[in-house]
Image: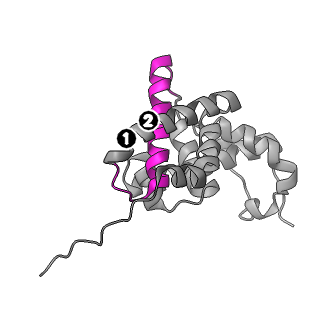
Amino acid sequence: MIFRKPPPVTKPAFEDVVDRELMSLYRVAKTLTSNAADAEDLVGQTLYLAARAWPTFDGAHPKSWLIRILSNEHLGLLRKQNRHPEPQLEPEHEPTTEGYWQAIDWALVGDQLASEMAKLPEEYRLAVALCDIEQLTYEEAAVAMDVPSGTVRSRLYRGRNLLRSRLVHVLGELSPT
């Protein structure tokens, strides 16, 4: 069996990647920090580190690469602050109806959803933000989070369930229409 190397990736210019991904980086940073000023600082530090490392980057998946830098920087800051959130699922608040998600009026939930999302443990919040908000594939999110894609799926599943149970608790049971 002959193995062929994949074609080389054409590496875009750093400035083009930053222009294209800046808002996405900010959204992910804001999701992680829950604070606009901290998010801006985190994005700035990420871009500084990325610019320094750009010559060694192979050009494959630049968005995931930038998000991984951002995530690693954020985790480093958390370690410095010596705090790491503990995941706590609240199974007693699970919805009783199958059509719960379809029954939510998202216009009414907006601010509450953002608030509850900010309370999710770090690894779940990042998985939900990357896959559901930024719409990265499991593989792209895995590269960004530096974990296997199965771990992304697991964290996404748990994060969605935790978010759903918190919304049920806060908003009360909604009956499907």
Q: Indicate the amino acid at tag 2.
A: Leu
**Residue 93 appears in the rendering:** yes
| Residue at the limit of the structure toward the left, as seen here | 1
**Residue 91 appears in the rendering:** no
Q: Is residue 66 magenta?
A: yes
Determine the main secondary structure of the stretch shown in magenta: helix
| Disc 2/disc 1 C-alpha distance (Å) | 6 Å
Q: Nearer the viewer, residue 81 or 151?
A: 81
- Mark 2 lies on a secondary structure that is helix
> In this rendering, would 135 be left or right of 67?
right
Q: Indicate the amino acid at tag 1.
A: Ala
Q: Residue at x 68, y 49 (%)?
A: 164
Numbered label attached to residue 53: 1
> In this rendering, would 27 be left or right of 57?
right
Above/below status of 75 relative to 126: above
Q: Residue at x 43, y 60 (%)?
A: 139
- Mark 1 lies on a secondary structure that is helix
Which color scheme does this rendered protein use?
one colour
Residue 122, quarter of picture: top right
| Residue at the limit of the structure toward the top, as seen here | 81
Q: Residue at x 37, y 41 (%)?
A: 53
Q: Nearer the viewer, residue 31 or 107?
A: 31
Numbered label attached to residue 49: 2
- Magenta range: 57-84
Q: Residues within 10 Å of mark 1 (few under 14, many from 20)?
A: few
Instruction: Give the quadrant of the N terminus.
Output: bottom left
